[in-house]
């Protein structure tokens, strides 16, 4: 019986706690549990998450920092108690429920056994296999029992299950069985007290059995959350897990709020009658020697030919590469390269990392052999060895990059090599190669823990509170609309704006819960490209489980956790731009008959730099955003390093750190180059005294604050770490202390601290920026020289980048490229190139759609044929069938098309007709009919030539096609099937311009005709509205009007509430800046209108042109649904 | 043969404005839904102009200068009835096309009401007098009239043979075509009736089928069809005016018996039965004031806006006295029946439970006609009481214990102790094995043993089932108690039946739930439907009869102690 008066004696350790990493069965993050341990002065805790050690790294790290001992374990699902006959029917009827066996890790062997046990369980079925498949069997437990300690569990444990199913005797047998599996010393009879009658019955039985079997009693609290109030979150999770609402979840929900982390005194009072159960917790805790610091991970060895060591093999491969890359270089460079490579190889040898380099080299080699474009990014680009091995494409010697950023002796951490691959199938092939090479249990993808974020939290919490779908939609929309929030943009106000009254108790609860579940794990996903490999058995380091994608295995930790635990990973990342480059090269090879080798692009191509300097960069990698465009004319890149800086400078880190303007001013000579402290000059000289790259920040910390390599590493991790706020605060304290010691003045300290901490918002390492700059250069070069191929490839890989396809098309047209509409007689599924001798037809015809740049007619003799993928509603399968059927014989009529491609559904035919893709079918088969009689086409197989002879070429319009489609789509039945309708012109009027625009945007999301604004130019002229092309020619400070289609709306977190609009007209893109006040006054207009006219003062400085808006008006240009890329 | 169509634009709003003439000319939006989501369902042109859009929430709409009203189906029914009245005042041949549209056959009315133009004017005038601002159109066929009324504001007269010409400018959606066809026509650029009418017929038939042809004919105003006059609803109602007011139930029952026999005979003649009887008694108003019943009835009237307070459970229902001194009473039956004797008994029980309170001067009895349900029991099913007998018994019981206290207790799936709801008792068909369900709601919760098996039962609960349990005799409602607490434990209790020092104590057993429903105000014992939290204790109290074991609890919401029950 529970007695509330008891001695406050022994120290209690919680040995049965679950975090939110039990996925909807726990309500606190591991860090919260640790914080609570600190608050109640608990010296240690065991984390027992359900069937995994998902939260263990975070728990371990948080505990290490807080000085709490973090024991590891897991609640393992079992299904091995015989269900007594009496309850057989009951067991079949009810939801299958496993018993949860709490296993605590005592030693490293125990940890390895636990990982293997869980891996075996999880790999038994697919990801969402039913619980009974996954559950551990008795022989599994016997095999992996060593080093593990077993508790008899709480209300879903084996003791409770045995008691329920078979009474005391069955329970006793069950406990004896556990003893036989785990050993007499390793079984503890667990007692929990949550003020529940049923539980006390179980406790009485448990005490009796423990005494009879001479087993120790152990008190736990079966913790599911850190603080009592988090029971509400757990209840919400329970409802989510069972797909119910809170209202209908009934007794699935908790009975009370007692499963929080309780202090020693509280537990001692609860177990006043059984003090030994409390005392035992401390003793058991002291037995548990294992922590995650003792993981035992080993990177795999690369198999080398006989007589070679990995190091000698690596040396040979590196030397081969060195000869290739530097063989023809100038002598000083060659010598520097040789020295650096020697230095790197020495360090690699010393740290025994040759295997790692060889494995990455091997993957790159595989990709090259398979013709897959691959390029290393990240800090690997700092290494001359990586460059020589072909892993990276940036020459670190020439760029003078800092090798220590990649690898340093004192850091004692694995280097990080990321490989960019074309996204999609190519990347998958590389991933499968790694699996195949290192075996199923030797390689795995890192996990991606999917957490509750704004919208998902709002949606699921709303659902459990019983809101209907309409309300859920409304609520989800409130969350996270813009990146930036006004300080006074309270939730109450947001709710009110969305039409909700927070006085309603359920809405209030919704808000509380949605905030409480933020960042808690929802389920485990798969990281897009992070792979870990291990010498021998990866499953003894971390449990593995199947991913949703067949053939994929994931580890239970995410990328950060793997890094924290010192597990080396290789990121095989899919990059859309790589696919674009690859596709462009293939088209250049196929259509132009030329070879474009990305590795040997002409350096310093004047056209590329001219385009960059003018910010004429739509579609180019990394330099196309509005912010980049506004920086380019000021930075005026003249060499490759300038592109590196450009890529790195427009990041939240440098922007918040207020480093952009000083850098640009210094570059333009408007501001002297100074340094926060003279000692920092060597570090910052190349960026004119302004830190722009991560490496510089680390160096600053080392020089100014005397950070050790390890501390600098901690700083680096905090910089790129998403859970970094607390870390950053801690680091700031350290930084200041260090700088104080070095006698740095307070102002300089502020400046340095500001520079460093602002990078927490994300900044690039120099090597990474260099790798991206290479891609940026390559994309720019392709756009300048092979516009048709580049545009087609870009259109084929949408969605990607900053702009909608309609903007990409308009930009390409302005550069003189002709883009032809989708046509069932010519188009493939993807956009293709067609020979054309009228490459500038569009611009000549349009009058106003003229080329803006001094581009040579770079499109050559090619134009782009829009692919059928752009016809909305058309399935790929049907389109491919159409193309297949067209190959042998073109379609002679729409009827013919509908008959021969039965895969095409009516709505697809209509979609094709509406965008004009059937116009050429209709026009090439119009029979010449001399009288009013019908023309019968006797045979379907009649030669197309014959048909041609009987037809005259009349240009049909889309409505003709729509008219005929409506008939063709109605199956006439076998009798009338062969009768060809005399496809005379339809009685329908051709579409008006406006109707065509509407149909274009509705059907393809873009128009290949004139820009909608072009049709209204006379009216715009009458209103004195300037075109985007005119604006750069106007003086700074002039009051102007501009108008266009809103193609991007941004409210960046770094811009203090300013909103940036990009307005596109037929001549280009104009930028508009909206102040926060104006935005507030015209919120609906600015957020909702598709076409706007703005009026304000022109800001035209350093060729950066924008209108600072004082007044904004809606424009009724067209009913067509245009698109805007809104950042929210 | 001319026809006139009357169409009320923005009908939902018009129905509201009709009830509140002060809203006339103002911007009005009608809301529907239940809190917290109440959205705009309709608005008039002025409200749309003010910025109101469909689906706005109430909070959003309230930011605009418009009058907001909740949608009321009764008002719409009344508005529709008024529209019908308006038409029927002119012609007996009226077609109800929609809630907002009626069509009249004007044949032969010219002599009575003048030429069509005047008639149309009169119709509009009459509708306006009835509170409805309507469009009126006269044409030579009903559909042309309907479309003209929908499409043109005010009065429209279409001369014979000029339908196509007149209707031409109207948008195609006045034809109320299916969304698919509307979309096709839109794609074709066919946006008005003129364009639709001009398309070649054969081609239309090939593409849109017969429906396309029909629409085209409608567009040309060329569909000739007979009017489908509204049939008067099938009403079974008998009324008897009494020469002398009847004050006693006995003679009233005699009269009711006669009326019931007539009604049942009429229903039987049409092979119908009834599942609802409506009894309206007109009372002698001179004597109402003295009636002790009157006060209660006045209160009842306040409860239901429509004049009827209807409770879902139970046989019956309620009574309301309308201002003219009449009382209406419903008797609802679980299944269609046709037994005048049974009906009489049910009515007698009803009247006994709720005496009219004044002498009756007029009796109206109406029956809702429904098809009788053929009934045949399963061969292997145990006999259940005859539905009519059961109904009678339940009605009698309800008369004794009260309507809300009869039915079958259904245990709710919640941790809240003793949570149940009363459901209307209806014998369920037993499973084929003939075994009575162990989980019969009425049997659940005996002795705190929940025998219902649900997937939610934990192992601990299952364990609890297998041990011998003590039965708890609950006090309903729980007894308020005064408890002295020392060091967190109850040491002395004083309640109605249990008083004394606490000899031994077990607990607390802690329960809480429904936290998302909001907190009950402090000191409010009735926290039903809100969050709840309580600490239970099992205590032994020595009494004269020996030791009494009882369960007490401290309600955290109200801060009060209660005795929940005693253990056997």
Image: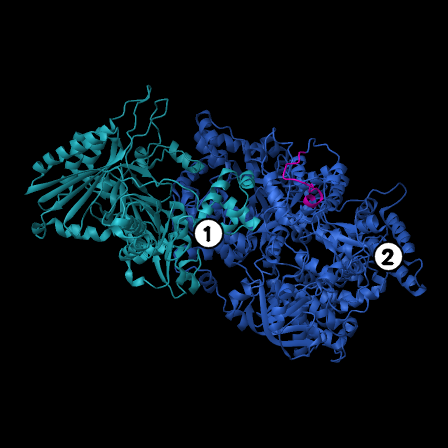
Judging by colour alone, the chain drawn in cyan in this rendered image is B
Mark 2, Cα crowd under 10 Å, few <14 / some 14-19 / many 20+, is few
Q: Is residue A725 left or right of residue B245?
A: right
Q: Could one spot residue A671 in this view of the protein?
A: yes
Q: Secondary structure at mark 2?
A: helix
Q: Main secondary structure of the magenta part?
A: loop
Q: Is residue A888 left or right of residue B558?
A: right
Look at mark 2 in the image and give the residue it sits on: A600
Q: Residue B324, position in %: x, y?
A: 15, 51
Q: Residue B423, position in %: x, y?
A: 30, 38
The C terminus of chain A lies in quadrant: bottom right
The N terminus of chain A lies in quadrant: top left
Residue in the foreground of this view, choosing between A110 and A719:
A719
Q: Chain of mark 2?
A: A
Q: Is residue B394 left or right of residue A1073?
A: left
Choose top left, top right, bottom left or bottom right for residue A744.
bottom right
Residue in the foreground of this view, choosing between A852 and A763:
A852
Identify the mark at residue B146; answer none if there is no mark: none
Q: Secondary structure at mark 1?
A: helix
* Residue at mark 1 to residue at mark 2: CA–CA distance: 74 Å
* Magenta-tinted stretch: A921-936
Judging by colour alone, the chain drawn in blue in this rendered image is A
Is circle 1 on the same chain as circle 2? no
Q: Residue B482, position in %: x, y?
A: 24, 52
Q: Say if A946 sits above or below A424 in the image.
A: above
Choose top left, top right, bottom left or bottom right for residue A481.
bottom right
Which color scheme is applied?
Answer: by chain
Identify the mark at residue B165; answer none if there is no mark: 1
Q: Residue A847, position in %: x, y?
A: 71, 65
Circles 1 and 2 in contact, beta carbons < 8 Å: no
């Amino acid at each position: 019986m529970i007695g509330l008066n008891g001695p406050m004696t022994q120290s209690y350790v919680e040995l049965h706690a679950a975090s939110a990493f039990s996925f909807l069965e726990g309500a606190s993050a591991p860090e919260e549990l640790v914080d609570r341990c600190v608050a109640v002065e608990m010296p240690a805790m065991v984390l027992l998450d359900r069937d995994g050690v998902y939260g263990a790294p975070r728990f371990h790290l948080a505990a290490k920092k807080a000085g709490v001992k973090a024991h590891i374990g897991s609640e393992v699902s079992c299904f091995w108690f015989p269900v007594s006959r009496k309850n057989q029917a009951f067991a079949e009827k009810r939801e299958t429920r496993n018993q949860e066996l709490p296993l605590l890790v005592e030693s490293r062997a125990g940890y390895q056994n636990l990982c293997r046990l869980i891996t075996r369980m999880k790999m038994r079925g697919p990801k969402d296999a039913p619980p009974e498949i996954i559950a551990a069997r008795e022989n599994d437990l016997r095999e992996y029992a060593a080093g593990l300690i077993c508790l008899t569990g709480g209300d879903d444990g084996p003791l409770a299950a045995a008691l329920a199913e078979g009474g005391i005797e069955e329970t006793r047998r069950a406990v004896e069985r556990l003893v036989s599996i785990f050993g007499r010393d390793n079984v503890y009879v667990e007692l929990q007290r949550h003020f529940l009658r049923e539980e006390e019955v179980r406790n009485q039985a448990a005490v009796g059995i423990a005494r009879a079997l001479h087993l120790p009693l152990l008190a736990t609290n079966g913790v599911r959350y850190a603080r009592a109030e988090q029971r509400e979150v757990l209840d919400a999770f329970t409802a989510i897990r069972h797909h119910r609402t809170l209202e209908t979840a009934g007794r699935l929900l908790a009975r009370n709020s007692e499963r929080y982390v309780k202090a020693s005194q509280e537990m001692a009072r609860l177990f006043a009658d059984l003090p030994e159960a409390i005392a035992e917790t401390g003793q058991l805790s002291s037995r548990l020697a294992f922590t995650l610091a003792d993981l035992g991970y080993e990177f795999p060895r690369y198999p080398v030919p006989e007589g070679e060591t990995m190091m000698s093999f690596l040396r040979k491969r590196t030397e081969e590469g060195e000869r290739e890359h530097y063989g023809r270089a100038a002598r000083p460079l060659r010598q520097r390269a040789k020295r650096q490579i020697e230095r790197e190889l020495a360090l690699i040898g010393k740290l025994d990392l040759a295997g790692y380099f060889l494995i990455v080299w091997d993957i790159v080699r595989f990709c090259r052999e398979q013709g897959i474009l691959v390029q290393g990014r990240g800090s690997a680009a700092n290494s001359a060895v990586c460059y020589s091995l072909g892993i990276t494409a940036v020459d670190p010697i020439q760029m003078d990059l800092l090798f220590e950023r990649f690898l340093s002796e004192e850091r004692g951490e694995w280097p990080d090599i990321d490989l960019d691959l074309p996204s999609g199938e190519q990347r998958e092939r590389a991933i499968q190669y790694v699996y195949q090479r290192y075996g199923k249990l030797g390689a795995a993808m890192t996990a991606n823990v999917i957490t509750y974020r704004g919208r998902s939290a709002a949606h699921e919490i709303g659902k459990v509170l019983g809101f209907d779908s309409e309300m859920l939609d409304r609520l989800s929309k409130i969350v996270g609309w813009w990146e930036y929030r006004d300080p006074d943009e309270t939730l109450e106000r947001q709710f009110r704006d969305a039409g909700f009254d927070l006085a309603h108790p359920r809405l209030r609860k919704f808000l509380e819960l949605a905030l409480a579940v933020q960042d808690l794990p929802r389920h485990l996903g798969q990281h897009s490209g992070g792979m870990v490999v291990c010498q021998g058995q990866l499953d003894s380091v971390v449990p593995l489980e199947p991913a949703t994608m067949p053939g994929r295995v994931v580890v239970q930790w995410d990328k950060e956790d793997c890094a924290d635990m010192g597990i080396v990973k290789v990121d095989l990342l899919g990059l859309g731009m790589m696919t674009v480059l690859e596709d462009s090269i293939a088209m250049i090879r196929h259509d132009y008959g030329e070879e474009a080798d990305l590795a040997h692009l002409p350096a310093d191509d004047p056209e590329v730099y001219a385009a960059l300097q003018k910010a004429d960069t739509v579609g180019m990698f990394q330099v196309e955003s509005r912010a980049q465009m506004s920086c380019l004319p000021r930075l005026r890149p003249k060499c490759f390093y300038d592109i590196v800086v450009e890529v790195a400078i427009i990041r939240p880190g440098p922007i918040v750190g207020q480093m952009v303007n000083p850098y640009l001013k210094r570059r333009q000579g408007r501001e002297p180059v100074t340094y926060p402290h003279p000692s920092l000059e060597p570090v910052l000289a190349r960026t004119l005294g302004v830190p722009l790259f991560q490496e510089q920040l680390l160096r600053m910390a080392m020089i100014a604050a005397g950070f050790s390599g390890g501390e600098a590493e901690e700083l680096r991790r905090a910089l790129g770490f998403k859970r970094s706020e607390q870390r950053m605060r801690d680091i700031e304290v350290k930084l200041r202390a260090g700088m104080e010691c070095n006698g740095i003045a307070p102002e300089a300290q502020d400046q340095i601290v500001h520079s460093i901490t602002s990078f927490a918002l994300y900044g690039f390492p120099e090597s990474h920026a260099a790798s991206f700059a290479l891609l940026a250069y390559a994309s720019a070069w392709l756009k300048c020289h092979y516009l048709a191929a580049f545009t087609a490839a870009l259109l084929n890989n949408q969605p990607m980048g900053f702009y909608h396809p309609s903007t990409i098309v308009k930009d390409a047209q302005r550069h003189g490229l002709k883009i032809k509409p989708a046509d069932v007689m010519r188009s493939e599924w993807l956009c293709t190139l067609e020979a054309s001798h009228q490459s500038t037809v569009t611009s000549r015809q349009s009058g106003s759609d003229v080329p803006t740049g001094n581009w040579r007619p770079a499109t050559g003799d090619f134009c782009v044929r829009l692919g059928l993928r752009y016809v909305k509603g058309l399935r790929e399968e049907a389109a491919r069938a159409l193309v297949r059927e067209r190959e042998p014989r073109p379609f002679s009529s729409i009827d013919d098309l509908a008959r021969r491609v039965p895969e095409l559904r009516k709505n697809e035919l209509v979609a094709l007709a509406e965008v004009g893709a059937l116009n050429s079918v209709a026009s090439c088969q119009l029979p010449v009919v001399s009288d009013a009689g019908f023309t019968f086409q006797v045979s379907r197989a009649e030669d197309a030539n014959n048909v041609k002879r009987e037809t005259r070429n009349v240009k049909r319009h889309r409505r003709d096609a729509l008219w005929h489609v409506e008939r063709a789509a109605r199956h006439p039945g076998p009798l009338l099937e062969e009768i060809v309708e005399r496809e005379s012109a339809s009685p329908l009027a051709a579409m008006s311009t406006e109707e065509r625009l509407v149909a274009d945007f509705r059907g393809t999301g873009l128009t290949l005709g004139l820009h909608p604004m072009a049709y209204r130019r006379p009216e715009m002229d009458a209103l004195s509205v300037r075109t985007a092309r005119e604006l750069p020619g106007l003086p700074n400070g002039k009051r102007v009007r501009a108008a266009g289609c809103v193609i991007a709306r941004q409210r960046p977190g770094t811009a203090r509430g300013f909103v940036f609009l990009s307005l596109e007209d037929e001549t280009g893109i104009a930028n508009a800046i909206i102040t926060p006040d104006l935005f507030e006054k015209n919120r609906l207009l600015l957020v909702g209108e598709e076409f706007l006219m703005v009026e304000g003062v022109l800001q035209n400085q350093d060729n950066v042109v924008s209108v600072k808006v004082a007044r904004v008006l809606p424009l009724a240009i067209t009913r067509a649904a245009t698109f805007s890329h809104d950042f929210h | 043969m001319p026809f006139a169509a009357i169409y009320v634009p923005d009908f939902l709003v018009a129905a509201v404005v009709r009830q509140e003439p002060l809203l006339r000319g103002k911007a009005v939006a009608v809301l529907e839904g239940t809190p917290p989501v109440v959205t705009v369902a309709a608005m008039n042109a002025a409200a749309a102009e003010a910025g109101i859009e469909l689906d706005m929430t109430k909070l959003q709409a309230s930011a605009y200068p418009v009058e907001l009203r909740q949608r009321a189906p009764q008002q719409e029914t009344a508005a529709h009835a008024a529209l019908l009245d308006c038409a029927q005042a002119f012609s007996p041949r009226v077609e109800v096309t929609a809630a907002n549209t009626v069509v009249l056959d004007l044949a032969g009315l010219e002599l009575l009401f003048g030429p069509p133009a005047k008639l149309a004017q009169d119709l509009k005038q009459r509708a306006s007098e009835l509170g409805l601002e309507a469009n009126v159109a006269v044409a030579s066929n009903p559909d042309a009239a309907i479309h003209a009324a929908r499409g043109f504001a005010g009065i429209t007269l279409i001369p014979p043979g000029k339908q196509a010409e007149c209707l031409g400018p109207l948008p195609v959606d006045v034809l109320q075509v299916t969304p698919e066809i509307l979309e096709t026509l839109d794609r074709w650029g066919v946006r008005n009736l003129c364009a639709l009418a001009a398309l070649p017929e054969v081609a239309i038939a090939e593409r849109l089928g017969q429906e396309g042809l029909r629409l085209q004919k409608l567009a040309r105003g060329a569909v000739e069809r007979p009017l489908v006059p509204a049939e008067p609803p099938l009403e079974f109602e008998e009324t008897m005016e009494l020469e002398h007011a009847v004050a006693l139930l006995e003679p009233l029952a005699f009269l009711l018996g006669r009326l019931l026999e007539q009604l049942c005979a009429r229903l039987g003649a049409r092979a119908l039965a009834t599942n609802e009887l409506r009894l309206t008694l007109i009372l002698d108003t001179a004597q109402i004031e003295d009636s002790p019943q009157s006060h209660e009835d006045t209160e009842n009237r306040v409860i239901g806006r429509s004049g009827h307070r209807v409770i879902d459970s139970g046989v019956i229902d309620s009574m309301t006295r309308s201002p003219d001194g009449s009382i209406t009473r419903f008797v609802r039956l679980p299944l269609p029946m046709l037994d005048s004797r049974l009906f009489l008994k049910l009515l007698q029980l009803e009247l006994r439970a709720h005496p009219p309170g004044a002498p009756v001067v007029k009796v109206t009895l109406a029956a809702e006609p429904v098809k009788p349900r053929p009934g045949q029991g399963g061969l292997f099913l145990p006999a259940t009481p005859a539905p009519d007998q059961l109904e009678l018994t339940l009605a009698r019981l309800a008369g004794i214990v009260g309507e809300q206290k009869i039915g079958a207790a259904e245990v709710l799936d919640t941790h809240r102790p003793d949570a149940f709801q009363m459901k209307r008792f209806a014998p369920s068909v037993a499973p084929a094995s003939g075994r009575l369900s162990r989980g019969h709601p009425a049997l659940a919760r005996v002795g705190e043993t929940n025998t219902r098996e649900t997937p939610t039962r934990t192992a601990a609960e299952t364990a609890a089932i297998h041990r011998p349990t003590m039965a708890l005799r609950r006090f309903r409602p729980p007894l308020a108690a005064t408890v002295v607490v020392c060091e967190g434990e109850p040491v002395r209790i004083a309640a109605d039946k249990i008083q004394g020092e606490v000899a031994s104590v077990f607990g607390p057993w802690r329960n809480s739930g429904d936290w998302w429903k909001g907190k009950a105000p402090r000191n409010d014992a009735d926290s039903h439907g809100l969050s709840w939290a309580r600490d239970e204790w099992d205590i032994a109290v020595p009494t004269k009869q020996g030791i009494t074991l009882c369960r007490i609890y401290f309600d955290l919401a109200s801060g009060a102690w209660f005795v929940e029950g005693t253990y056997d």
